[in-house]
Amino acid sequence: MEDILSQHQVSNRTISLSSIELSECISSYNENTGNNVGDAQTKIKLKERQALIHKLDLRLLPILSIIYLLSYLDRSNIANAKIGGLEHDIHLTSIQYQWSLSIFFFGYVLFEIPSNIILRRWRPSRWIALIMFSWGTIAVCMAAVSNFIGLLVCRFLLGAFEAGLFPGVIYFMSLWYPRKMQAIRLGFFWSFSALAGAFGGLIAYGIGQIKSSKIAHWQLIFIIEGFPTILMSICCYFFLPDSPERARFLTVEQRQLEIEILAEDSGASHSHSFSWSQVKSVYTDWKTYVYAIIYITGTTALQGVTLFLPSIIVGLGKWTPVQSQLMTLPPYAVAFVVTLSLSRSSDYFVERSFHLVFTNLLSIGGFLILMFVERNRYSMLYFGVILLTAGVYANVSLKIAWFNNNFASLTRRAVASATIVSIGTIGGAVAGQIYQEKQKPQYFLGNSISLGCIVVQTILVLSLRFIFIYENRRRGRFTKEQIERQIQRYGGNDLIGDRHPDFRYTL
């Protein structure tokens, strides 16, 4: 009997243990199955996101990049036209030529902010197409100028109509891409300005081979480079989408996913509302002015290179004017590659400031070579030109991605980008004055001022980085009560934007 009871107890224990083990196995199986299902769903979502971004890239980047290439050709081809005989044919003095360069930026500064407000409230495809058609028409008409006043008026109008494009595209990109993906896209877009410099030199060289007694080489430059802009404006009208919500080239599911990605990226600072209080808030934000100084210091050096590169290369004394047009290609080609490489690296590490410092080191090296190396060392001087061009061009995409990342809410971002670029564009007007004919071939004064600007920018970039580190850490220590007080202090969730305690600045 005892043996039977003993066996029964052992059997019960065995059954009990088996039940526990089975329960654990089922639990483990469910957990593993759940993980597998979760992993599978994550992979599917990741693939959907990658497919969406790839689709956006194929639709947006080619259009925007070609538009900017054409705009940069139209604004900078005056440097090639000068070598092609513009100065001689319409009897320009060196001072008048400098003012024809600077006046472009006065039009640019005046109309950038109104243009971005219109872009924010209207349809980007319509507005960008309209201003493109307008500046393309002006660019072609420049072939008909016969005196300084005519050139001055055309350059002013060219700047006024082009004013809406660059800050407009900076804002437009933020409608489609999260912050960590913007630098490479803005870099790709901006790098076409370097290609424009290369193409401009190549086209000018080709035009220089044309033998014609009826039309001058500089007139052909304006006509051949201006007319494609008019054609592209028509393409822009029909093919440039306005916003994710209205993007007909996306499926309903892709539009919803795109909206979710952008909302997730912006977090608590995500807002589609428009109010004049939001516009006003940009001008009471200290970041606006620090970024504007960073931009103006970089633009002074950049536009000095853009507007005077052919003249600087002619000043080396080794090539004829026609050959000098061709020799502008390598610096711009290198600038194109460096811009894309650093923009990709910046997005990969989600880091902007140290990348900016690196571009400035390239620029400083280039300026020092041009200022202090003996004039008969042509190879070294030309290397300095390449170094400088790569540095000043790569600098732009990184700084525009940086301030675009650190202004939240669509209205604040649109107004901030226009304001910063508008103030910063004054550097172009400065560049048109500091590189004077009497300084050639060394352009020591112009290079010295530009070098000083790059040094100032480097100091500001590093200072701003440390301020953002401090602010991000401070916000991380906020209590719930402090968060609520901060939101109310700036007028609620619709107005607070990047001042929200949950927002973290990109470094």
Image (tube, rainbow, N blue to C red):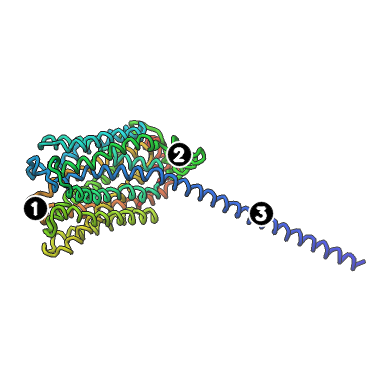
- Above-or-below relation of 496 to 477: above
Q: Sequence-wise, which precedes: disc 3 or disc 1? A: 3
From the image, state whether disc 2 or disc 3 is nearer to you.
2
Identity of the residue drawn at 22% across and 56% down: 388
Residue 203 relative to residue 339: left or right? left
User: Mark 3 falls on what kind of element?
Assistant: helix
Q: Amino acid at mark 3?
A: Asn
Quickly name the residue at label 1. Answer: 439
Residue 488 in view (yes/no): no
The amino acid marked with disc number 2 is Phe
Q: How many residues crowd around disc 2 within 10 Å: few (fewer than 14), some, or many (20 or more)?
A: some
Give the CA separation, mark 3 to mark 1. Answer: 79 Å
Packing grade of label 1 (10 A; few <14, some 14-19, many >=20) is: few
**Quarter holding residue 71:** top left
Asked whether, in this view, residue 245 is left or right of residue 43, the answer is: left
Of circles 1 and 2, the one toward us is: 2
Foreground: 135 or 404?
Answer: 135
Residue 287 figure quarter:
top left
Q: In this rendered view, identify the residue nearer to me: 67 or 53.
A: 67
Q: Residue at x 31, y 51 (%)?
A: 398
Q: Position of residue 456 (x, y in %)?
A: 21, 53
For the point 20% across and 54% down, the residue is 326
Provide the residue designation for mark 3.
30
Location of residue 11 in the rendering, given as x and y in whole percent from the top left corner: 83, 63
Q: Residues within 10 Å of mark 3 (few under 14, many from 20)?
A: few
Q: Secondary structure at mark 1?
A: helix
Q: Residue at x 83, y 65 (%)?
A: 10
For the residues labelled 2 and 3, say whether their Cβ atoms are less than 8 Å apart. no
Lower sequence index among marks 1 and 2 = 2
Q: Can you tell which mark lies on residue 249?
A: 2
In this picture, residue 341 sits left or right of residue 448: right
